[in-house]
Image: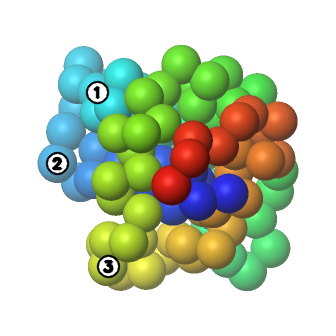
Amino acid sequence: MKGLAFIVVLVLVMAIATTDAQSICNMPASDLMSCKPAVTPPEPPPPTATCCSALSHADIRCLCSYKNSNLLPSLGIDPKLAMKLPSLCKLPHPANC
């Protein structure tokens, strides 16, 4: 669940500062953006297959480095929802993330 926060941060960073040709933590910007609806309040839908697939190929430890960023709330992303993404996608959580 903690992995979600870093993913959300990455999605926002990518949306603001990059194009689809770039990636963060092994996730292309378009894949990061596919996760944003699932971490945006008040009633987010479940993550899409595209989002979960992207997460499964991402460098989760790299994404974890973004989990405590103040950027998420400033972009309309709920860190608590972001932390749930790996579980919702049935993906393992790295230790200490």
Circle 2 is placed at which residue position?
17
Count residues near mark 2 (Cα–Cα under 10 Å), then give few for <14, some for 14-19, many for 20+.
Answer: few
Circle 3 is placed at which residue position?
70
| CA–CA distance in space, label 2 to label 1 | 11 Å
| CA–CA distance in space, label 3 to label 1 | 21 Å
- From this viewpoint, which residue is outermost toward the front? 95
Circle 1 is placed at which residue position?
23
Residue for point 29% across, 44% down:
14
The residue under label 3 is which amino acid type? Answer: Asn
The residue under label 1 is which amino acid type? Answer: Ser
Circles 2 and 1 in contact, beta carbons < 8 Å: no
Q: Nearer the viewer, residue 92 or 38?
A: 92
Q: Nearer the viewer, residue 67 or 8?
A: 67
Residue for point 57% across, 75% down:
78
**Quick check: 93 left or right of 70?**
right
Colour scheme shown:
rainbow
